[in-house]
Every structure is written in structure tokens, then in C-alpha cells.
Amino acid sequence: MSIWIHENSRVLIQGITGKQGTFHGTKMDEYNTNVVGGVTPGKGGQFVDLPNKKVPVFNTVSEGLEATEADVSLIYVPAKFAAAAIIEAADAFQQKGGGLIVCITEGIPILDMVKAVARVDQYPEVRLIGPNCPGIITPGDDGGCKAGIMPGFIHAKGRIGIVSKSGTLTYEAVAQTMSVGEGQSTCVGIGGDPVNGTGFIDCLDAFEKDSQTVAVVMIGEIGGSAEEEAAEWASKNMTKPIVGFVAGSTAPPGKRMGHAGAIISGGKGTAAEKFKAFEEAGIYVARDPSEIGDVLVKALEDNGLR
Amino acid sequence: MNIHEYQGKSLFKEAGVKVQNGVHCKTVEDAVNAYDSLGSKVVAVKSQIHAGGRGKGTLYDEKTNDLVMEGGVKIAFSRNDVENYARNIIGRKLVTKQTGPSGKIVNNLYIEAGCSIAHEYYLALLVDREKKSILIMASTEGGVDIEEVAENNPEAIHKIWTHPIDGLKENDAIKMAEDLELIGNSKQDLVMMLKSLSKMFVEKDCSMIEINPLVRSESGEMIALDAKISFDDNASFRHPWMEEMRDHSEEEEVETRAHDHGLSYVKLDGNIGCLVNGAGLAMASMDVIKLYGGEPANFLDIGGGATKESITTAFGIILEDDNVEGILVNIFGGIIQCDMVAKSVIDASNELGLEVPLVVRFSGTNHLEGKEVLDNCDLDVHTASTLAEGAEKIVDLTRSVK
């Protein structure tokens, strides 16, 4: 198994008729992801042409779930409307007994996210990944389930779980696993916003319980204390080895480094603190992302997995 | 986005938070007139810049760098004092703990009626990332560096949380007032103030409100003697007034220009420029340059929607920095195609007359095509297949230039 999505997951795309929605819907279909439909208010009844099929558009997520039995809703809605889209999806999934929401959108107001996350948290069977993230992918035997914007072709089915706050740095981690002959079970981009849905600990917990995953690569970055908390949690709860990297050792304090959440404030949230927490928790640390592959090999060998 | 204290106080007034009367001034003459109009014998003459530590800062002459005055916030006891202080402040460079050694030129002044202070407190509201809620924190130790209080005396900092959906709970506000040992009208004042500030925080999409000091006057009133407010830029679409409050002279011009082109740029002090797609990878590229003995000159994320135009702008911005002695381009193609980046890099280099070494590392979408474009061009460009190799090469090349 993989975590949260599998090869046959049924994916609905909120914002499918927009430029981003159509572009990435096409890429997902090319990767053999089971895109079952889309949602754009006011465009219900239309169809969108994907390379392998034509999918229906619905006015609401509820209608879409009713008709398609989707278990994942992927959001490519502009920032102004994205929090409302998350809340709509959460309410709709709750009616159907649960589901996964993946929000790619960058630039959502933080207080909108505080409200949206509060709604999602009321529903134990509904999970939110993101926002401001590349999404989640489970590579399969022929393509796989790609709910996001990552380039599908760099992945291969395997036994390494990846969780990261960053987009392209996740791809780097994927390439590193491939460079040492390892594939991925599931790769999750949790996003670089200060307030988001799924966190590191949720991912580590799921990877620990997943039979396909034997080791995890965790990529953090400066800002907040999620990495420290995850490290402490892992030291008590993880039996599988973790390889960790943190971006931003050279970032100056008080400056936002691209991501809304990537800021050292009041001397807190530095890469040095996070690396230290990783080391104290027994995580295999890579100081350079180009070393992730080699460090992973060592972690696997130490644990009798290679 | 940050605003000045005088702007923050006008928002406080609107929200029902008690402040002293004050006047925003831009000239010495304005300041003297403000003193006359306020009708208060004692006033505070306050430098307005977007940085903390003003009171303990130092003012220098912009051209000669001669010391002009210690302290960017002064208490004036006469019209004459106001005139002297204003003259020493306006147009001078104020250096504080937070501005860095280059300081900031003071273009704005705030003249505020004096206040008889019984006690100074600290109060702040901010988004708590971990609790996914709004944190209100306060301390009886106000007027000092709160980070020092947090370090040395953490139990002196009291915390409550409020959620934008439910709003502030009366009981939490009362508890905070009691934690601060307030009684009578001071207690009532604080409860009212916390309610007003919580409402304002949500309505105006603040990312932080800090009042240091918040004071209890001799008559027991709770008054915001300072106002440091920043807003969530992502919410500016629903607050057109934010643009009017923006002081462009307080922002880094080059960072604003980069932002207008869809780029995210932060200038650093090193000599190796970098151009990268993705914030995390951009930070990692800086880190690896440092790991191989170099110093990054900047953070630059060209974003997922980069075009030939934005890449040319990015190159231009990197090369504007006189410290730059070499450039590392690190692209992991996802949506972005490496061959497009390769062509853009060649065009930009030719257009701008690139004279420093250039190392390019491509991976992901169309990386082979991108490398081929670079291999067949006239430009002296080095390629690398991993980030480590790229960083090592550019560090070596900039060393050999010296």
C-alpha cells in the first residue's frame, strides 16, 4: 500500500476549467491518474477534454462527489476563493464519510487558512494537504496517482516515503532516491505556508503504518517549529529510519524567503535548531540535498534493508 | 506589509483603542505647530521608521555620518525642545538594533501628548502557527525587549488564544487582565482593548499587532503608547486602503521590483549570485554554496510561471549587485522546461553583457535538451549535473577570478 492515495484513487479537480486546472488535469491524465471530473461553479454540465478521456464538470463539490464517487478533491482555485473551496470540499466529503483535499494554491490569506483548517479539523475523516504545495503522488506500475503539479516522469514505484515543505526540493529528493536505485511509496508536499493542513507528524505516522514504506526522507525549511516537534515525535514513535534535510542555513533573520512561512522571527525557527533536533532524534542528516541518496543508502544498510 | 506608528494609532483610534492625541509631521515647522495645537506641556517627539529600538537608536548625519543625537524618541518639555529635537531627527539616519548599520532615513515624525505613567506593560497579537489560532500575549514587564523577558523570565509572559470564527471569549480577556494584576477601571479598559484589538486583527487581516509599551496612566487608564502593526500581503486584494498606507521608501526597491515580475528576491552579502526555481531549492542552493566555501549574494526564486522576460529581469537584478563575481543557475524542471530556461539565460547574458563566470545545473523536465542548447552556444557557460557539483564549480571559478 501507499499512504492516503493509491493507483486507483478517483480525483475531482476544483477549478478544472481554469488555465491551471486544465493544464495540470491534462498532465495528471497523461500520468494515468484517474481524473473523474471537475468543479467550476456555473459551468456544470460542460465537459473537459483530457488526452485519454472526457470528464464532466459540476457546479458544486457535493454534486461532483455524488456523481463520480471521487475520494480526492484537488484545488486549483485562485487564492481569493481557495479557502472557501477547501471548506466546500470538507463539508461535501463529510457528508460522504470522508476524503482527501489537496490544495495547490499559493498566496491564501493566513486568517482564511486559520478558518478553513478549523473546519477541516472538525471532521476526523477529512484530510487537507497544503496549501502552497506541489500535492501528493503515489507512483504505480504504469504511471500512478498524481494529485498535484509535480513532474510525474521523475518518479518510480518503490519503498521510500517522502515528505517536504518545498516543491522543487521534493523533486530533488525524489531524484536522489532514484540515483541510488530506490523508488517512492508516496511523496507528500505539505506546503510552505505558516498555517496548513497535514503536517510532518501526520505523514510520519502514516508512513510508519504503511507496509510498502521502509524509510522516510523528510525535508524541512526555516520558520516555525514543526520540524522540531516532528523530530521529537519520531524519536518516540518511529521504527523506520528517517533521512532529514533543512533548507535555509544561510537565510538571514527577519526576512521571508519566498514561502510565507519561511522566516526566522525573534531568533526562532533557524535551520541550526532544526538540524540539532534531527540529530538528537537519531535522524540521518544530509547537510546537502545532493547527499540525500548516499545518506539514505547508509540508513537502509544500518537497518538491514540493503 | 508594515506601517508607521502614526498610521497604526489612527487605526487604533478607529477601533476604539485608547491612544494619546498626536500629530504626524514632515517638517520642523509642522512639529512646532503640532506642539502648539496639542496643548500639552510635555510631548514625545518620535522618529517614524519601520524598525524597532527607536528610543535606544542613534541619529547620524546622512552625508558626513557625524553623530547628531542619541535616541530617536525624545521627551520635550518646551516648544524650544520640540524644535531642537525635530531638527535633529528629520532627514537624519537612524540606526537601531533592528535597522542594521546602514540605518534608515527619518522622513516622518510623530508629536504626541505626554502621559503620566504608573506602569508599563507589553501586549501583542500574532498568528500562532502551531496552534493555528491567534495568540494574545502580554507581560507586566513592558517597555523592554520582550525577547529578553521570554529568555530570562518566561513566566512573566501571559498567553490567551482567540479564534477568528468565535472571537475573543470574555473569560479569557478577564483572565488576562487578572494575570496582569489589573483592577477596577484598568481591568475594564484592558478587557475592552483586547476585544477591540482582536476584532481589528481579523477585520484588517493583520499578521501582527505589538504595543510596547502599553501603559497604565496615573488615573488608571490603559493607553497604547506605541503601535507596531503589520498586515498579511496575501489579503491586500480585499483591503484597497493598504496601498495608501504603504511607504515605498521603507521597502527595498529591488525586492519590490522583483516581486512585480513574479520573482522573489532577497539581497545577501556574498559574491555568488543564484537563480533558482522554488523557494526551498533556492534556500538549499545558498546553503550548498556556503558548504563549498562560497558566500551567496542573494536568494532568488523565479517561481513556477517564469518566462524569458522574468528570467532576463532576474539576471539583471543579480548583476546590479556589484559584489557578484559569479552566478549559479539551478533549475529542477517541473512545469518549467530547462530548454526554455537555457535559451533565456543565453539571451539575457548576451543582452546584459555577462562578464562573470556562469554555472548552470539542470534536472527534471527537458534537462538534456537544455544542456544541449548550452553546449552549442557561444557563451562561456559551465554545466553541472548535481547541485553539489554546480556549487563546487562556481565557488572554484570565483576564487580563480581573484
Image: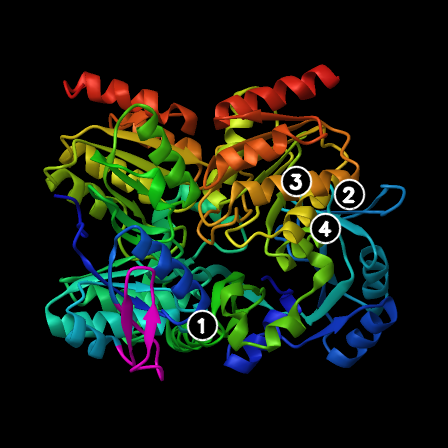
- For residue B342, which quarter of the picture? top right
B181 versus B101 height, above or below: below
Q: Position of residue B371 (x, y in %)?
A: 56, 32
Callout 4 touching callout 1 (CB < 8 Å) = no
- The residue that disc 2 covers is B351
Report the chain holding disc 2.
Answer: B
Viewer-proximal residue, B15 or B385? Answer: B385
Give the mark nearer the N terminus: 3 vs 4.
4
- The mark nearer the N terminus, 2 or 3, is 3
| Residue most extreme to the front | A52
Residue that numbered label 1 is attached to: A80
Mark number for residue B71? 4
Q: CA distance from mark 2 to mark 4?
A: 48 Å
| Figure quadrant of residue A79 | bottom left
Alpha carbon separation for disc pair 2 and 3: 10 Å
Secondary structure under the numbered disc 3 in the rendered image: helix
Mark 1 crowdedness (10 Å alpha carbons): few <14, some 14-19, many ≥20? some
Q: Is residue A105 above or below residue A210?
A: below
Indicate left or right for B372 with A66 as reference.
Answer: right
Q: Amino acid at mark 4?
A: Gly
Magenta-colored span:
A37-60
Residue B173 makes an appearance in the image: no
Q: How far apart in space, not on screen, are marks 1 and 2 (Cα)?
A: 38 Å
Q: Nearer the viewer, mark 2 or mark 4?
A: 2
Classify mark 2: helix, strand or loop: helix
